[in-house]
Image (cartoon, coloured by chain):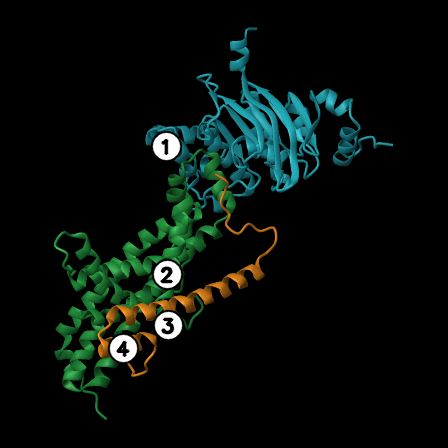
Amino acid sequence: MSFDFAAVINATPYLLQGLLFSVELTLVAMTGGMLLGTFMAIVRHMAVPVAADAIRAYVTLMRSIPLILVLFWFFFLVPLLLGHLTPAGRSIPLGPKFTAFITFTLFESAYYAEIVRAGLKAIDKGQYEGAKALGLSSSTMYWNVVVPQVLRVTAPIIVSQTIILFQDTALVYVLSLTDFFGAAAKIAQRDSKLVEFYSTVAVVYLLICSMGSELSERFRKKQGYRPPRGGLERAKRMFGLARP
Amino acid sequence: MTIGLLEITARAEQINEFTFRTFDAFASATVLYLLIALVLHQVAFQVERMLRIPGVSQNNTVKK
Amino acid sequence: MDDAFLARNEILRIEGLEQSYGSLPVLKGIDLRVNKGERVVICGPSGSGKSTLIRCINGLETFKSGTICVTDVRSGDHLTLLKDIRREVGMVFQSFNLFPHMSVLENCMLAPIKVRDVKKAEARERALYFLQKVRVLDQAQKYPGQLSGGQQQRVAIARALCMQPSIMLFDEPTSALDPEVVQEVLATMVGLAKEGMTMLCVTHEMGFAREVADRVILIDGGRIVEEAAPAQFFDTPQHERTRAFLGRVLRGYPEVA
Protein backbone atom coordinates (compact mmCIF):
# COMPACT_ATOMS: atom_id res chain seq x y z
CA MET A 1 0.00 0.00 0.00
CA SER A 2 1.79 3.12 -1.14
CA PHE A 3 0.77 6.71 -0.74
CA ASP A 4 1.22 8.66 -3.93
CA PHE A 5 1.25 12.18 -2.63
CA ALA A 6 2.77 13.52 -5.80
CA ALA A 7 -0.71 13.29 -7.27
CA VAL A 8 -1.99 15.48 -4.48
CA ILE A 9 0.74 18.02 -4.99
CA ASN A 10 0.03 18.15 -8.71
CA ALA A 11 -3.62 18.80 -8.06
CA THR A 12 -2.94 21.56 -5.53
CA PRO A 13 -4.04 24.53 -7.68
CA TYR A 14 -7.39 22.94 -8.34
CA LEU A 15 -7.79 22.01 -4.69
CA LEU A 16 -6.91 25.53 -3.63
CA GLN A 17 -9.63 26.88 -5.90
CA GLY A 18 -12.12 24.66 -4.19
CA LEU A 19 -10.76 25.64 -0.78
CA LEU A 20 -11.07 29.29 -1.66
CA PHE A 21 -14.72 28.82 -2.50
CA SER A 22 -15.36 26.92 0.72
CA VAL A 23 -13.75 29.66 2.76
CA GLU A 24 -15.55 32.38 0.82
CA LEU A 25 -18.92 30.73 1.34
CA THR A 26 -18.22 30.20 5.03
CA LEU A 27 -17.25 33.83 5.58
CA VAL A 28 -20.25 35.20 3.71
CA ALA A 29 -22.70 32.88 5.43
CA MET A 30 -21.15 33.53 8.84
CA THR A 31 -21.19 37.32 8.50
CA GLY A 32 -24.62 37.53 6.94
CA GLY A 33 -25.98 34.83 9.22
CA MET A 34 -24.66 36.53 12.37
CA LEU A 35 -26.02 39.93 11.38
CA LEU A 36 -29.42 38.58 10.44
CA GLY A 37 -29.45 36.14 13.35
CA THR A 38 -28.57 38.79 15.91
CA PHE A 39 -31.30 41.04 14.58
CA MET A 40 -33.83 38.21 14.74
CA ALA A 41 -32.76 37.26 18.25
CA ILE A 42 -33.18 40.83 19.46
CA VAL A 43 -36.63 41.14 17.89
CA ARG A 44 -37.68 37.94 19.61
CA HIS A 45 -36.17 39.03 22.91
CA MET A 46 -38.04 42.30 22.72
CA ALA A 47 -41.23 40.36 22.00
CA VAL A 48 -42.24 42.69 19.18
CA PRO A 49 -45.89 41.75 18.49
CA VAL A 50 -46.08 40.18 15.04
CA ALA A 51 -42.44 39.99 14.09
CA ALA A 52 -41.39 37.83 17.03
CA ASP A 53 -43.85 35.10 16.12
CA ALA A 54 -42.94 35.26 12.46
CA ILE A 55 -39.29 34.87 13.35
CA ARG A 56 -40.06 32.00 15.69
CA ALA A 57 -41.83 30.22 12.83
CA TYR A 58 -38.94 30.91 10.47
CA VAL A 59 -36.30 29.67 12.91
CA THR A 60 -38.30 26.53 13.68
CA LEU A 61 -38.76 25.83 10.00
CA MET A 62 -35.11 26.34 9.08
CA ARG A 63 -33.93 24.18 11.91
CA SER A 64 -36.33 21.37 11.04
CA ILE A 65 -35.14 20.70 7.52
CA PRO A 66 -31.69 19.48 6.53
CA LEU A 67 -29.54 21.95 4.63
CA ILE A 68 -29.47 19.79 1.55
CA LEU A 69 -33.22 20.01 1.25
CA VAL A 70 -33.19 23.77 1.74
CA LEU A 71 -30.65 23.97 -1.06
CA PHE A 72 -32.93 21.95 -3.31
CA TRP A 73 -35.90 24.19 -2.51
CA PHE A 74 -34.04 27.38 -3.18
CA PHE A 75 -32.45 26.15 -6.33
CA PHE A 76 -35.70 24.91 -7.86
CA LEU A 77 -38.33 26.97 -6.17
CA VAL A 78 -37.06 30.53 -6.09
CA PRO A 79 -36.59 30.81 -9.86
CA LEU A 80 -40.20 29.63 -10.25
CA LEU A 81 -41.44 32.24 -7.80
CA LEU A 82 -39.42 34.97 -9.44
CA GLY A 83 -40.77 33.83 -12.79
CA HIS A 84 -44.33 34.30 -11.57
CA LEU A 85 -43.53 37.79 -10.39
CA THR A 86 -42.15 39.01 -13.69
CA PRO A 87 -44.48 39.63 -16.66
CA ALA A 88 -42.63 37.11 -18.81
CA GLY A 89 -43.78 34.26 -16.62
CA ARG A 90 -40.81 32.04 -17.27
CA SER A 91 -38.63 30.88 -14.45
CA ILE A 92 -35.49 32.91 -13.93
CA PRO A 93 -32.52 30.86 -12.99
CA LEU A 94 -30.33 32.31 -10.31
CA GLY A 95 -26.66 31.56 -10.55
CA PRO A 96 -25.73 28.58 -8.38
CA LYS A 97 -23.11 30.63 -6.58
CA PHE A 98 -25.62 33.33 -5.67
CA THR A 99 -28.09 30.67 -4.57
CA ALA A 100 -25.45 29.08 -2.38
CA PHE A 101 -24.58 32.36 -0.67
CA ILE A 102 -28.19 33.32 -0.01
CA THR A 103 -29.30 29.87 1.08
CA PHE A 104 -26.42 29.26 3.43
CA THR A 105 -26.82 32.71 4.97
CA LEU A 106 -30.54 32.25 5.56
CA PHE A 107 -30.05 28.74 6.89
CA GLU A 108 -27.27 29.62 9.29
CA SER A 109 -29.03 32.75 10.49
CA ALA A 110 -31.65 30.56 12.15
CA TYR A 111 -28.98 28.75 14.15
CA TYR A 112 -27.09 31.91 15.02
CA ALA A 113 -30.38 33.50 16.07
CA GLU A 114 -30.96 30.78 18.64
CA ILE A 115 -27.41 31.07 19.94
CA VAL A 116 -27.68 34.83 20.38
CA ARG A 117 -31.13 34.51 21.91
CA ALA A 118 -29.77 32.14 24.54
CA GLY A 119 -27.02 34.65 25.19
CA LEU A 120 -29.52 37.49 25.58
CA LYS A 121 -31.41 35.47 28.17
CA ALA A 122 -28.19 34.71 30.00
CA ILE A 123 -27.12 38.31 30.49
CA ASP A 124 -27.84 39.59 33.99
CA LYS A 125 -31.18 41.40 34.15
CA GLY A 126 -29.46 44.29 35.93
CA GLN A 127 -27.59 45.17 32.74
CA TYR A 128 -30.89 45.79 30.96
CA GLU A 129 -32.21 47.75 33.95
CA GLY A 130 -29.09 49.87 34.29
CA ALA A 131 -29.24 50.75 30.61
CA LYS A 132 -32.96 51.56 30.72
CA ALA A 133 -32.53 53.66 33.86
CA LEU A 134 -29.92 55.76 32.09
CA GLY A 135 -32.47 56.48 29.39
CA LEU A 136 -30.68 54.54 26.66
CA SER A 137 -32.86 53.65 23.71
CA SER A 138 -33.45 49.98 22.97
CA SER A 139 -31.10 50.02 20.02
CA THR A 140 -28.31 51.65 22.02
CA MET A 141 -28.92 49.25 24.87
CA TYR A 142 -28.65 46.19 22.67
CA TRP A 143 -25.83 47.45 20.45
CA ASN A 144 -23.54 49.06 23.04
CA VAL A 145 -24.34 47.23 26.25
CA VAL A 146 -25.90 43.83 25.75
CA VAL A 147 -24.66 42.35 22.47
CA PRO A 148 -20.94 42.92 23.23
CA GLN A 149 -21.42 40.90 26.39
CA VAL A 150 -23.47 38.26 24.59
CA LEU A 151 -20.80 37.77 21.94
CA ARG A 152 -18.12 37.27 24.55
CA VAL A 153 -20.22 34.74 26.40
CA THR A 154 -21.38 32.78 23.33
CA ALA A 155 -18.11 32.94 21.35
CA PRO A 156 -17.31 29.23 21.80
CA ILE A 157 -20.75 28.15 20.56
CA ILE A 158 -20.62 30.56 17.66
CA VAL A 159 -17.26 29.13 16.66
CA SER A 160 -18.73 25.62 16.89
CA GLN A 161 -21.57 26.61 14.61
CA THR A 162 -19.19 28.23 12.16
CA ILE A 163 -17.04 25.11 12.08
CA ILE A 164 -20.13 23.08 11.27
CA LEU A 165 -21.01 25.62 8.61
CA PHE A 166 -17.55 25.30 7.09
CA GLN A 167 -17.91 21.55 6.95
CA ASP A 168 -21.42 21.86 5.50
CA THR A 169 -20.11 23.77 2.50
CA ALA A 170 -19.38 20.36 1.03
CA LEU A 171 -23.08 20.18 0.23
CA VAL A 172 -22.82 22.65 -2.61
CA TYR A 173 -22.28 19.67 -4.89
CA VAL A 174 -26.06 19.51 -5.21
CA LEU A 175 -25.85 22.85 -6.98
CA SER A 176 -23.04 21.54 -9.16
CA LEU A 177 -20.61 23.89 -7.49
CA THR A 178 -17.15 22.80 -6.56
CA ASP A 179 -15.94 23.36 -3.07
CA PHE A 180 -12.82 21.96 -1.46
CA PHE A 181 -14.24 18.53 -0.80
CA GLY A 182 -15.87 18.37 -4.20
CA ALA A 183 -12.62 19.29 -5.92
CA ALA A 184 -10.74 16.60 -4.06
CA ALA A 185 -13.42 14.02 -4.76
CA LYS A 186 -13.41 14.75 -8.50
CA ILE A 187 -9.68 14.35 -8.87
CA ALA A 188 -9.58 11.39 -6.54
CA GLN A 189 -12.11 9.62 -8.73
CA ARG A 190 -10.38 10.68 -11.93
CA ASP A 191 -6.97 9.47 -10.79
CA SER A 192 -8.22 6.62 -8.61
CA LYS A 193 -6.26 7.90 -5.66
CA LEU A 194 -9.06 7.97 -3.14
CA VAL A 195 -6.99 7.37 0.00
CA GLU A 196 -4.43 10.10 -0.68
CA PHE A 197 -6.94 12.76 -1.51
CA TYR A 198 -9.47 12.01 1.17
CA SER A 199 -6.81 11.87 3.86
CA THR A 200 -5.35 15.16 2.68
CA VAL A 201 -8.80 16.71 2.79
CA ALA A 202 -9.36 15.36 6.29
CA VAL A 203 -6.08 16.83 7.52
CA VAL A 204 -6.78 20.24 5.97
CA TYR A 205 -10.27 20.40 7.47
CA LEU A 206 -8.81 19.39 10.83
CA LEU A 207 -6.17 22.10 10.68
CA ILE A 208 -8.59 24.83 9.69
CA CYS A 209 -11.17 23.92 12.29
CA SER A 210 -8.55 23.69 15.02
CA MET A 211 -7.27 27.12 14.04
CA GLY A 212 -10.79 28.43 14.37
CA SER A 213 -11.10 26.98 17.84
CA GLU A 214 -7.73 28.37 18.83
CA LEU A 215 -8.76 31.79 17.57
CA SER A 216 -11.84 31.80 19.72
CA GLU A 217 -9.82 30.72 22.74
CA ARG A 218 -7.44 33.61 22.13
CA PHE A 219 -10.32 36.03 21.84
CA ARG A 220 -11.90 34.73 25.01
CA LYS A 221 -8.72 34.97 27.00
CA LYS A 222 -7.87 38.39 25.64
CA GLN A 223 -8.54 40.10 28.93
CA GLY A 224 -5.65 39.21 31.18
CA TYR A 225 -4.97 35.48 30.99
CA ARG A 226 -1.82 34.35 29.17
CA PRO A 227 -1.75 30.66 28.30
CA PRO A 228 1.65 28.88 28.30
CA ARG A 229 3.68 29.86 25.30
CA GLY A 230 5.54 26.72 24.30
CA GLY A 231 4.82 25.20 20.89
CA LEU A 232 3.91 21.80 22.27
CA GLU A 233 1.51 23.39 24.76
CA ARG A 234 -0.21 25.26 21.99
CA ALA A 235 -0.49 22.16 19.84
CA LYS A 236 -1.92 20.28 22.78
CA ARG A 237 -4.48 23.00 23.37
CA MET A 238 -5.45 23.07 19.72
CA PHE A 239 -6.36 19.41 19.87
CA GLY A 240 -8.04 19.78 23.23
CA LEU A 241 -5.48 17.70 25.09
CA ALA A 242 -4.23 20.34 27.50
CA ARG A 243 -5.98 22.36 30.15
CA PRO A 244 -7.04 25.71 28.63
CA MET B 1 -26.64 9.41 0.41
CA THR B 2 -22.90 9.68 -0.08
CA ILE B 3 -22.21 6.23 1.35
CA GLY B 4 -25.16 4.56 -0.26
CA LEU B 5 -27.60 4.65 2.62
CA LEU B 6 -30.93 6.01 1.48
CA GLU B 7 -32.55 8.26 4.03
CA ILE B 8 -35.49 10.60 3.48
CA THR B 9 -33.78 13.11 1.19
CA ALA B 10 -32.08 10.46 -0.88
CA ARG B 11 -35.33 8.62 -1.37
CA ALA B 12 -37.00 11.86 -2.39
CA GLU B 13 -34.30 12.32 -5.00
CA GLN B 14 -34.87 8.76 -6.20
CA ILE B 15 -38.60 9.36 -6.49
CA ASN B 16 -37.84 12.51 -8.44
CA GLU B 17 -35.66 10.56 -10.83
CA PHE B 18 -38.23 7.84 -11.36
CA THR B 19 -41.44 9.83 -11.60
CA PHE B 20 -40.23 13.37 -12.47
CA ARG B 21 -42.64 14.75 -9.92
CA THR B 22 -40.01 16.95 -8.34
CA PHE B 23 -42.27 19.20 -6.34
CA ASP B 24 -44.33 16.37 -4.88
CA ALA B 25 -41.30 14.34 -3.94
CA PHE B 26 -39.44 17.11 -2.18
CA ALA B 27 -42.58 18.56 -0.63
CA SER B 28 -43.37 15.22 0.96
CA ALA B 29 -39.83 14.93 2.26
CA THR B 30 -40.06 18.43 3.71
CA VAL B 31 -43.37 17.72 5.40
CA LEU B 32 -41.95 14.54 6.89
CA TYR B 33 -38.96 16.40 8.29
CA LEU B 34 -41.20 19.13 9.65
CA LEU B 35 -43.42 16.65 11.45
CA ILE B 36 -40.47 14.91 13.06
CA ALA B 37 -38.98 18.26 14.02
CA LEU B 38 -42.21 19.53 15.52
CA VAL B 39 -42.47 16.43 17.67
CA LEU B 40 -38.89 16.96 18.84
CA HIS B 41 -39.64 20.62 19.55
CA GLN B 42 -42.57 19.67 21.73
CA VAL B 43 -40.42 17.19 23.62
CA ALA B 44 -37.76 19.83 24.15
CA PHE B 45 -40.39 22.32 25.28
CA GLN B 46 -41.78 19.87 27.83
CA VAL B 47 -38.31 19.09 29.12
CA GLU B 48 -37.59 22.79 29.46
CA ARG B 49 -40.82 23.26 31.37
CA MET B 50 -39.95 20.42 33.71
CA LEU B 51 -36.55 21.93 34.37
CA ARG B 52 -37.92 25.40 34.97
CA ILE B 53 -36.83 26.96 38.28
CA PRO B 54 -39.65 28.76 40.09
CA GLY B 55 -38.89 32.42 40.71
CA VAL B 56 -36.35 32.71 37.93
CA SER B 57 -37.51 34.81 35.02
CA GLN B 58 -37.30 32.87 31.77
CA ASN B 59 -36.69 35.72 29.47
CA ASN B 60 -35.15 38.44 31.66
CA THR B 61 -36.52 41.29 29.57
CA VAL B 62 -37.20 44.48 31.45
CA LYS B 63 -40.82 45.50 30.99
CA LYS B 64 -40.76 48.21 28.34
CA MET C 1 -46.14 81.48 46.72
CA ASP C 2 -47.90 81.25 43.40
CA ASP C 3 -48.82 78.01 41.70
CA ALA C 4 -46.23 78.30 38.99
CA PHE C 5 -43.44 78.55 41.49
CA LEU C 6 -44.81 75.68 43.50
CA ALA C 7 -45.26 73.64 40.39
CA ARG C 8 -41.69 74.20 39.29
CA ASN C 9 -40.39 73.52 42.74
CA GLU C 10 -41.94 70.12 42.83
CA ILE C 11 -39.70 67.61 41.15
CA LEU C 12 -41.65 64.42 41.66
CA ARG C 13 -45.34 63.90 42.15
CA ILE C 14 -46.90 60.50 42.62
CA GLU C 15 -50.65 60.18 43.01
CA GLY C 16 -52.72 57.14 43.77
CA LEU C 17 -50.09 54.64 42.68
CA GLU C 18 -51.32 51.08 42.65
CA GLN C 19 -49.45 48.00 41.63
CA SER C 20 -49.93 44.26 42.04
CA TYR C 21 -48.05 41.13 41.12
CA GLY C 22 -50.84 39.13 39.57
CA SER C 23 -53.57 39.11 42.18
CA LEU C 24 -51.30 40.11 45.04
CA PRO C 25 -51.48 43.89 45.66
CA VAL C 26 -48.08 45.42 46.32
CA LEU C 27 -48.80 49.14 46.30
CA LYS C 28 -52.19 50.27 47.51
CA GLY C 29 -52.49 53.92 46.66
CA ILE C 30 -49.28 55.87 47.24
CA ASP C 31 -49.22 59.67 47.24
CA LEU C 32 -45.82 61.26 47.38
CA ARG C 33 -44.36 64.63 46.54
CA VAL C 34 -40.71 65.53 46.49
CA ASN C 35 -39.63 69.13 46.13
CA LYS C 36 -36.46 70.47 44.64
CA GLY C 37 -33.51 69.95 46.92
CA GLU C 38 -35.40 67.69 49.29
CA ARG C 39 -33.88 64.48 50.56
CA VAL C 40 -36.47 61.83 51.24
CA VAL C 41 -35.64 58.48 52.79
CA ILE C 42 -38.01 55.55 52.43
CA CYS C 43 -37.75 52.62 54.77
CA GLY C 44 -39.87 49.68 55.68
CA PRO C 45 -39.93 45.95 56.19
CA SER C 46 -38.99 43.75 53.27
CA GLY C 47 -41.89 43.03 50.95
CA SER C 48 -43.51 46.34 51.84
CA GLY C 49 -43.26 47.61 48.28
CA LYS C 50 -40.62 50.28 48.76
CA SER C 51 -38.36 48.94 45.99
CA THR C 52 -41.37 48.52 43.71
CA LEU C 53 -42.34 52.12 44.35
CA ILE C 54 -38.93 53.42 43.33
CA ARG C 55 -38.79 51.20 40.29
CA CYS C 56 -42.22 52.38 39.15
CA ILE C 57 -40.93 55.92 38.93
CA ASN C 58 -38.56 55.26 36.06
CA GLY C 59 -40.57 52.54 34.47
CA LEU C 60 -38.62 49.46 35.51
CA GLU C 61 -41.95 48.25 36.84
CA THR C 62 -45.29 48.99 35.28
CA PHE C 63 -48.12 50.07 37.53
CA LYS C 64 -51.83 49.42 37.43
CA SER C 65 -53.17 52.89 38.14
CA GLY C 66 -52.14 56.28 39.37
CA THR C 67 -49.94 59.01 37.95
CA ILE C 68 -46.27 59.77 38.13
CA CYS C 69 -45.02 63.17 37.04
CA VAL C 70 -41.43 64.32 37.00
CA THR C 71 -40.46 67.95 36.54
CA ASP C 72 -37.37 68.89 34.59
CA VAL C 73 -35.43 71.03 37.05
CA ARG C 74 -33.92 73.20 34.34
CA SER C 75 -36.81 73.82 32.00
CA GLY C 76 -39.70 73.35 34.39
CA ASP C 77 -41.44 70.99 31.96
CA HIS C 78 -43.71 68.37 33.43
CA LEU C 79 -42.70 65.03 31.99
CA THR C 80 -44.94 62.02 31.70
CA LEU C 81 -43.37 60.22 28.78
CA LEU C 82 -41.16 57.39 29.94
CA LYS C 83 -38.20 58.29 27.79
CA ASP C 84 -38.23 61.87 29.11
CA ILE C 85 -38.62 60.71 32.69
CA ARG C 86 -35.70 58.33 32.40
CA ARG C 87 -33.56 61.17 31.14
CA GLU C 88 -34.24 63.27 34.20
CA VAL C 89 -34.28 60.50 36.81
CA GLY C 90 -30.97 59.00 37.83
CA MET C 91 -30.90 55.64 39.55
CA VAL C 92 -28.37 53.81 41.65
CA PHE C 93 -28.94 50.10 42.12
CA GLN C 94 -28.13 47.72 44.90
CA SER C 95 -26.09 45.61 42.49
CA PHE C 96 -24.39 48.58 40.79
CA ASN C 97 -25.21 47.35 37.26
CA LEU C 98 -22.08 48.82 35.73
CA PHE C 99 -21.29 47.64 32.20
CA PRO C 100 -18.37 45.23 32.64
CA HIS C 101 -17.03 45.38 29.10
CA MET C 102 -16.50 49.17 29.18
CA SER C 103 -14.02 51.13 31.22
CA VAL C 104 -15.21 53.27 34.10
CA LEU C 105 -14.83 56.36 31.97
CA GLU C 106 -16.72 54.83 29.06
CA ASN C 107 -19.50 53.75 31.42
CA CYS C 108 -19.98 57.37 32.43
CA MET C 109 -19.73 58.75 28.91
CA LEU C 110 -22.17 56.47 27.13
CA ALA C 111 -25.51 57.89 28.27
CA PRO C 112 -24.75 61.62 27.87
CA ILE C 113 -23.48 60.98 24.35
CA LYS C 114 -26.40 58.82 23.29
CA VAL C 115 -29.28 60.40 25.18
CA ARG C 116 -28.36 64.04 25.69
CA ASP C 117 -26.42 64.38 22.43
CA VAL C 118 -23.34 65.64 24.22
CA LYS C 119 -20.14 65.77 22.17
CA LYS C 120 -17.60 63.14 23.03
CA ALA C 121 -14.98 65.57 24.36
CA GLU C 122 -17.48 67.30 26.59
CA ALA C 123 -18.86 63.99 27.81
CA ARG C 124 -15.35 62.97 28.71
CA GLU C 125 -14.75 66.13 30.70
CA ARG C 126 -18.05 65.75 32.45
CA ALA C 127 -17.27 62.14 33.30
CA LEU C 128 -13.86 63.04 34.69
CA TYR C 129 -15.43 65.82 36.75
CA PHE C 130 -18.00 63.57 38.38
CA LEU C 131 -15.54 60.72 38.85
CA GLN C 132 -13.35 63.12 40.71
CA LYS C 133 -16.30 64.25 42.78
CA VAL C 134 -16.96 60.71 43.99
CA ARG C 135 -13.23 60.24 44.40
CA VAL C 136 -12.56 57.43 41.96
CA LEU C 137 -10.78 59.50 39.35
CA ASP C 138 -7.64 57.36 39.56
CA GLN C 139 -9.72 54.34 38.51
CA ALA C 140 -11.04 55.99 35.36
CA GLN C 141 -9.27 53.68 32.91
CA LYS C 142 -9.98 50.52 34.83
CA TYR C 143 -12.80 48.09 34.23
CA PRO C 144 -15.60 47.58 36.76
CA GLY C 145 -14.45 44.04 37.46
CA GLN C 146 -11.15 45.40 38.74
CA LEU C 147 -12.73 47.66 41.35
CA SER C 148 -13.93 47.00 44.86
CA GLY C 149 -17.64 47.09 45.66
CA GLY C 150 -17.47 50.51 47.23
CA GLN C 151 -15.60 51.90 44.25
CA GLN C 152 -18.06 50.33 41.83
CA GLN C 153 -21.02 51.86 43.61
CA ARG C 154 -19.38 55.27 43.59
CA VAL C 155 -18.78 54.88 39.86
CA ALA C 156 -22.46 54.00 39.51
CA ILE C 157 -23.34 57.21 41.33
CA ALA C 158 -21.02 59.21 39.06
CA ARG C 159 -22.51 57.52 35.99
CA ALA C 160 -26.00 58.60 37.04
CA LEU C 161 -24.77 62.10 37.84
CA CYS C 162 -23.23 62.50 34.41
CA MET C 163 -26.75 62.67 33.01
CA GLN C 164 -27.34 65.67 35.30
CA PRO C 165 -30.72 64.37 36.43
CA SER C 166 -33.37 66.40 38.19
CA ILE C 167 -33.72 63.75 40.90
CA MET C 168 -31.60 60.82 42.04
CA LEU C 169 -33.16 57.56 43.14
CA PHE C 170 -31.24 55.15 45.32
CA ASP C 171 -32.45 51.56 45.69
CA GLU C 172 -30.69 50.19 48.77
CA PRO C 173 -27.32 51.37 47.49
CA THR C 174 -25.28 50.01 50.39
CA SER C 175 -27.09 46.75 51.09
CA ALA C 176 -24.72 44.67 48.98
CA LEU C 177 -21.54 46.22 50.33
CA ASP C 178 -19.11 45.12 53.01
CA PRO C 179 -19.61 47.14 56.20
CA GLU C 180 -16.20 48.85 55.87
CA VAL C 181 -17.03 50.35 52.51
CA VAL C 182 -20.61 51.33 53.32
CA GLN C 183 -19.30 54.51 54.92
CA GLU C 184 -17.43 55.69 51.85
CA VAL C 185 -20.55 55.37 49.72
CA LEU C 186 -22.74 57.04 52.32
CA ALA C 187 -20.21 59.86 52.62
CA THR C 188 -20.50 60.34 48.87
CA MET C 189 -24.27 60.49 49.14
CA VAL C 190 -24.08 62.95 52.00
CA GLY C 191 -21.80 65.15 49.90
CA LEU C 192 -24.32 64.97 47.11
CA ALA C 193 -27.12 65.97 49.43
CA LYS C 194 -25.17 68.92 50.74
CA GLU C 195 -24.83 70.22 47.20
CA GLY C 196 -28.59 70.36 46.87
CA MET C 197 -29.35 67.28 44.76
CA THR C 198 -32.93 66.12 45.10
CA MET C 199 -32.78 62.57 46.42
CA LEU C 200 -35.21 59.77 47.05
CA CYS C 201 -33.49 56.98 48.85
CA VAL C 202 -34.60 53.51 49.91
CA THR C 203 -32.23 52.35 52.57
CA HIS C 204 -31.80 50.61 55.88
CA GLU C 205 -29.07 53.00 56.98
CA MET C 206 -30.91 54.88 59.69
CA GLY C 207 -27.85 56.90 60.64
CA PHE C 208 -27.77 58.28 57.16
CA ALA C 209 -31.49 59.06 57.32
CA ARG C 210 -31.15 60.89 60.58
CA GLU C 211 -28.23 62.96 59.35
CA VAL C 212 -29.33 63.90 55.88
CA ALA C 213 -33.04 63.37 55.32
CA ASP C 214 -35.59 66.14 55.27
CA ARG C 215 -38.34 63.57 55.52
CA VAL C 216 -38.43 59.91 56.45
CA ILE C 217 -41.25 57.73 55.16
CA LEU C 218 -42.25 54.32 56.42
CA ILE C 219 -43.95 52.06 53.93
CA ASP C 220 -45.58 48.90 55.15
CA GLY C 221 -48.03 46.67 53.39
CA GLY C 222 -48.05 48.85 50.28
CA ARG C 223 -49.13 52.02 52.06
CA ILE C 224 -47.38 55.00 53.57
CA VAL C 225 -47.69 54.53 57.30
CA GLU C 226 -45.79 57.52 58.55
CA GLU C 227 -44.09 60.50 57.02
CA ALA C 228 -42.17 62.93 59.20
CA ALA C 229 -38.95 64.85 59.72
CA PRO C 230 -36.18 62.60 61.10
CA ALA C 231 -36.26 64.05 64.57
CA GLN C 232 -39.92 63.33 64.96
CA PHE C 233 -39.75 60.04 63.09
CA PHE C 234 -37.03 58.52 65.21
CA ASP C 235 -37.68 60.13 68.58
CA THR C 236 -41.46 60.36 68.69
CA PRO C 237 -43.00 58.05 66.11
CA GLN C 238 -46.75 58.40 65.88
CA HIS C 239 -47.74 54.94 64.70
CA GLU C 240 -47.32 51.64 66.38
CA ARG C 241 -46.04 50.00 63.22
CA THR C 242 -43.31 52.61 63.04
CA ARG C 243 -42.31 51.84 66.58
CA ALA C 244 -42.33 48.12 65.83
CA PHE C 245 -40.21 48.60 62.75
CA LEU C 246 -37.71 50.84 64.50
CA GLY C 247 -37.54 48.40 67.34
CA ARG C 248 -36.52 45.66 64.97
CA VAL C 249 -34.10 47.75 62.96
CA LEU C 250 -32.34 49.89 65.53
CA ARG C 251 -30.46 48.29 68.33
CA GLY C 252 -31.11 49.69 71.78
CA TYR C 253 -34.42 51.21 70.71
CA PRO C 254 -37.12 50.88 73.39
CA GLU C 255 -39.08 47.78 72.42
CA VAL C 256 -42.81 47.94 71.95
CA ALA C 257 -44.30 46.56 75.15
- Image spot of residue A65 (x, y percent): 35, 66
Identify the residue under disc 3: A239
Per the model, the C-alpha gap separating discs 1 and 3 is: 45 Å
Q: Earlier in the sequence, mark 2 or mark 3?
A: 2
Q: Name the subunit of mark 1.
A: C
Please tell me in which quadrant of the rendered image residue A199 appears.
bottom left
Q: Position of residue C7 (x, y in %)?
A: 53, 14
Question: Which mark lies nearer to you, 2 or 4?
Answer: 4
How packed is label 3: few (under 14 Cα within 10 Å), some, or many (20 or more)?
some
Q: Nearer the viewer, residue C19 or C163?
A: C19
Q: Secondary structure at mark 3?
A: loop
Q: Are marks 2 and 3 on the same chain?
A: yes
Q: Nearer the viewer, mark 4 or mark 1?
A: 4
- Quickly name the residue at label 1: C113
Q: What shade does chain C have? A: cyan
Instruction: Tell me how far mark 2 sits from mark 1, CA to CA.
Output: 41 Å
Give the residue type that dot 4 points to.
Ile
Residue underneath mark 2: A61
Tell whether label 1 touches label 4 (CB within 8 Å). Answer: no
How many residues crowd mark 4 within 10 Å: few (<14), some (14–19), many (20+)?
Answer: some
